[in-house]
Structures are given as structure tokens and as C-alpha cells.
Image: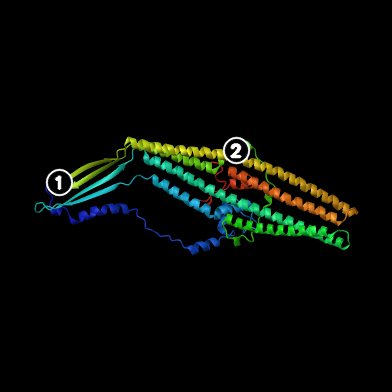
Amino acid sequence: MRYAARDWPPSALAATLILPLALAGCGFQSYKPKPIDQAETAARLQRRSLDDPKLREYITAQGQAPSQWPLSSWNPAQLTLAAVYFHPDVELAAARALVAQAQTATARLAPYPTLSVRPEYNTKVPSGDTPWGLGVTALIPLDLGGKTRIRAEQMASLEEAARLEVGAAAWRVRARLRRALLDYHGAEATVQALQHEQQQRTALLALMEKRLASGEVSRNDVTAIQLRVTEADTALRRAISRREQARAAVAEAVGLPLDQMQNVQFDLAGFDTPPPAPDLKELREQALTNRIDLRRKLAEYAAADLAVKLEVARQYPDFTIGPGYFWDFEHATWSLLMVSQIPLSGRRNAQIREAEARREVEERAFVAMQASVIAEAGSAWTRYTQALQGLESARASAGLAGQRRTKVQRQFDAGYVDRVDLRLAELEVAAAERALVSARLEAQQGLSALEDAVQRPLEPTEAETTSASAPAPSGTVSPALLDED
């Protein structure tokens, strides 16, 4: 059968060439640039405040509906939620988790088919026949061995690791905030104790100067007390400086500018009564099952195991079939092309061994992390129990100092001792108060180490608050959301 030139319109070639673009263009999206405005982002960061209505909505979603807004004072659990909401580290981890989620969705898609168009022009055709010929071949890849599915499973494991990293970032933010709040609370308590001590030393100095004037004591006795007053004044100034530095650290941990935290009141009364030490065996079990970094390492190991499975599946060659059609000025020809990459056994085996070696590394890394967690839990437990014993001793000493002051006060009221003895008893109480502040701080620092060992709150009030938390907006999470699966 002979085809005339009129049977092959000139627009047919153009239509054939445009067809692939038209098919692909059905799902086209336009590029939307998103430049970073440094001035605007800096201004937005500096406008952040604890009075933000969206922060109130977030705290309410976590099961802590505020009775008033803005809050008159912030406790550690509320500040933790604010830190998770505001801190850039959590936002960055959440953004990376979204990337991993998108990669998983991409991995589930089948490979692209391709379309090959081959036009020909023959200069030696008989008169009256078209010189054009046209060939079209569609290349359709076939996935044998379920490689696409395995790759999607592998990316899902990495997505889970990225999701857990959001929780790990939130926990790190919470841990930094708690340390900063402890420093602030310790410095504030030290300031109060030193102010009390300074009042007593100043009153004692006034009494001793009167005795010096009457010749009852020597100048050396008065000078020694003056030195103590100067030392206490220096210690007080240092404590005030540490308190302000701790407030700045709190602002950094929450993710707010310092000027937004200057007038914020903190409710840190819970730091005065640390909970009893948990059972060491239960603590280790919690650490081995709850640690976010361990669970993330398990997800990474699962991805490495699936990498081995993927390399094994790649032993089966992938095929690409290509049904084709070629039109000549006299003939129409159908064809079927089959393309396959031959997997050489030597290279395949080498790649499988490499994937198995990487899996072995991940397994060793997980076991090493387990050993580290067990050791960390034991060390933190020992530190906390010793700190609690020290706190009990400090409380006992403070109680004895208070009893002695009461006894001296009664003796003073009865006329058996003078005001100097009374001031000395008050100084003993002040010294015991400072020792008690240090013991409380050491116990709370030990509790922080214990919580870091299991990566969950151990204080009853905060644990109850965060365990019922709902997912945060924009992919952020409360640090206790990942306690249990």
C-alpha cells in the first residue's frame, strides 16, 4: 500500500513532538521563589513574646488551658511548652522531618516512563510520495523483585528516625531550660540567704563597735567582723550577677529575646522538694525502652537492614519494555524493545557485602549506645541518691541551727545572754540556709542528670502534665510525647 504526501499532514510531526510535553505538562507547577528577608526574620524573632495568643492556643492544646492570659507566673512545665513552641532547634528538626516524609512519598512512586520520537527524511523517494518517516517508542520500566517497595520501606524507617529526632531536639531544649531555671532558682535563693546573712553581720558589727567604744573588745575583733561583712557583700553581688546571667540563659533556652523575659515571674517552688530516687532496675528498664536516641538508632538500623534487602533484590534484573511504531512512506512497522541491565554476580555480591557491613556497623552502634545508656543511668542514679542524702543532712543541720536560735532567743528574753549571742545564733542559721540552698541545687542537678538518662520527666507534676500532651502545630512535639509507643 502506497501513502501519498497528502496522507501525512505537516502538522502531524509537530503534534507528535509536542505530545510528550503536553502529557507531562498536565501536572506542571509553577516555580514560586521564596527569598529570605534577613531584616524581617530578625524582627519576627525579636517580636516573640510569652503573651503571644498562638502560644496560648498551643498550651491549651497540650491540656493546660490557662485560667488567665497572660500568665502572672510561669512554672517549669509551662515554660517547657513555650520553649518547644518557640525554639528554632525544634523548628529545624521538624522541617527536616518533613523532608524525610517527602522523600518517603517520592520513594513510593514508580520510575518515569520515557517516550522516544525518531523522525526521518528520505531524499530518494519517488515523486508524489512523502519523504518523511516517523518512529515512536515508549520505554516502560518494570520493577522486578519489589525494589520500589523496599526502597519505600527504607525511606519510611529514615522518616521515623527523623520524626524521633524532633522529639530528641525538644528534649534537649527542655533539658537546657531546666538547667537554666535551676541556676536561676539557686542564685535567687542564695541572694536571699546572703541578704539575711548580711543583715545579721551588719547588726553584729554595730554591736561590736559599741563594745569597742566601751573597751569590751579589741580592734582586731571588730576588724575580723568587718572583713566578714565585706566578703558577704562580695558574695551577694556575685549571686545577683549569676541570677541575671541565669535569666538570660532561660531566655535563650525558651527562644525569646532577653528583654521579653526581664519582667517574667517564675514559679519554681517545686524545685524545693525533689522526688525520692526511683528503683535502679526500673530506671534502667525505662532508659532502655524510652530513650529517644535509642529508638532513633533502631530506626536507622532498620533502614540499614532494608538496604541489605534492597541489594539482594537487585540481583533480579530490571527490565524496560519498549513498544514501538515506525511509519515509512510505504510501510507501517510495529516493534517491541526489551532492555535489561545485566547484574554481574561479582559486583552484586560485593554490593551485598558492603550493605551487610554497614548493617553490622549500625548494630554495633546500637549495642554501644545501649551500654552507654546503662552506664549513664547507673551513674545518674548514684549521683542523685548521694545528693538526696546530702540534702537530708543539710536539712538536719538547718533544723538544729533553727532549734539553737530558738533556745538562744529564749535565753535572751530571760536575760541570760546578750544581743551578740543572739546575732551569732542568727548567723549560724544563715550559714545553714546557704548550705541547704547548695544541697537543694545539687539534688536538683542530680535529678536533671537522672531525667536525661531516661529522657522523660520524673517530677510528678510535670510528668502528669506532659504525658497528656497533644501534637504541637507545625510538626513540633512536646518532649514527653514520645515516651511510649
Is any atom of residue 267 visible in this view?
no
Amino acid under label 1? His
Q: Is tag 2's residue or tag 1's residue first in the polypeptide sequence?
A: 2
Amino acid under label 2? Arg
Q: Secondary structure at mark 1?
A: loop
- 10 with respect to 300 (left or right): left
**Cβ atoms under marks 2 and 1 closer than 8 Å:** no
User: Is residue 441 or residue 29 the one in the foreground?
Assistant: 441
Which residue in the rendered view is the most extreme toward the right?
415
Q: Position of residue 117 (x, y in %)?
A: 23, 50
Q: Which mark is residue 331?
A: 1
| Residue that label 2 marks | 284
- 139 with respect to 171 (left or right): left
User: Is residue 14 or residue 353 the one in the foreground?
Assistant: 353
Which residue in the rendered view is the most extreme toward the left?
127
Q: Secondary structure at mark 2?
A: helix
Q: Position of residue 266 (x, y in %)?
A: 65, 56
Q: Position of residue 256 (x, y in %)?
A: 57, 58
Residue appearing at x 36%, y 35% in the figure: 349
